[in-house]
Amino acid sequence: MKSGRSGAGEGKGQRTVRDRKTMVTRKRETRQDQTLLSGDLRARVAAQAYSFYERRGYEDGYDLEDWLEAERRILTE
């Protein structure tokens, strides 16, 4: 069984998903790299996340955790 191939009646922005005995056509998310944060808020979160990185001694591998913690702190201010 292959999935993701175009089937009859499948329009642009859709894909066919086969799950065992059923076939479901779902719309693809046409999300571009959009952010819900304004430019100023994004800059504040980035600066806060970078400060976490600095405090850790520039140790890599925690970028997502730093970003999420920075968002949490700034959005709860």
Image (spheres, grey):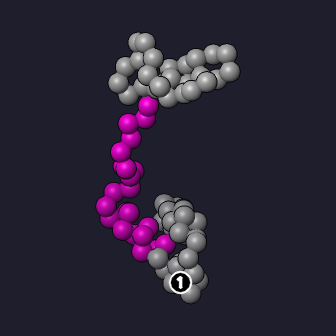
Q: Dot 1, crowdedness within 10 Å: few (<14), some or many (≥20)? A: few
**From what the image shows, is residue 31 above or below residue 50?**
above
Residue at (47, 25) in percent of width and height: 5
| Nearest the eye: 25 or 35 | 25
| Boundaries of the magenta span | 28-49
Q: Is residue 69 visible?
A: no
**From what the image shows, is residue 76 above or below residue 53?**
above
**From what the image shows, is residue 75 above or below residue 58?**
above
Q: Quadrant of residue 59?
A: bottom right
Q: Quadrant of residue 21?
A: top right
> Where residue 48 sits: x, y (%)?
47, 74
Residue 25 belongs to magenta span: no
Q: Is residue 20 visible?
A: yes
The furthest residue to the left: 39
Residue at (37, 50) in percent of width and height: 33
Residue at (38, 63) in percent of width and height: 42
The residue indicated by pointer 1 is 58
Residue at (53, 69) in percent of width and height: 63
The furthest residue to the front: 1
> Where residue 49 sits: x, y (%)?
49, 72
Name the amino acid type tagged 1. Answer: Tyr
Residue 36 belongs to magenta span: yes
| Nearest the eye: 23 or 75 | 23
Q: Which quarter of the rendered picture does the N terminus lie within? A: top right
Left or right: residue 2 versus residue 30 is: right
